[in-house]
């Protein structure tokens, strides 16, 4: 089970809500791309999406007004 430390993930002032929304959106994209290409995923789409965001392949962009919530 993939369980990263949220302090490291949220170090660039991303809110938890934005992180969850971004991971869910990217996981849906990964799942639909795999289905269209008839690929079998070895890992769950949520794990892949979270790994991509942690590694910096995708960046979470959030409005300034919700950063300090």
Image (tube, rainbow, N blue to C red):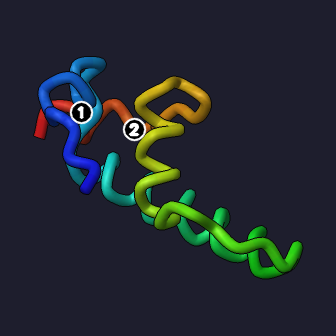
Q: Toward the viewer: 41 or 60?
A: 41
Residue 21 is drawn in which quadrant? Answer: bottom left
Determine the secondary structure under disc 2: loop
Report the quarter where the N terminus lies: bottom left
Height in image: 11 above or below 67? above
Determine the secondary structure under disc 1: loop
Give how far across and how far down residue 60 sits, in percent.
46, 37
Q: Toward the viewer: 58 or 35?
A: 35
Residue marked by disc 1: 67
Q: Toward the viewer: 6 or 15?
A: 6
Residue at left 77%, top 69%? 33
Give how far across and how far down residue 29 sits, in percent.
66, 65
Q: Give the Cα distance between marks 2 and 1.
A: 7 Å
Residue at left 34%, top 30%? 64
Residue at left 52%, top 64%? 45
Residue marked by disc 2: 63
Q: Are marks 2 and 1 in contact (CB under 8 Å)?
A: yes
């Amino acid at each position: 089970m993939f369980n990263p430390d949220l302090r490291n993930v949220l170090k660039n002032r991303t809110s938890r809500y934005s992180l969850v929304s971004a991971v869910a959106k990217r996981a849906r994209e990964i799942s639909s791309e795999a289905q269209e290409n008839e690929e079998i995923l070895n890992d769950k789409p949520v794990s892949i999406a979270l790994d991509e965001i942690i590694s910096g392949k995708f960046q979470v962009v959030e409005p300034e007004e919700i950063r300090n919530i």
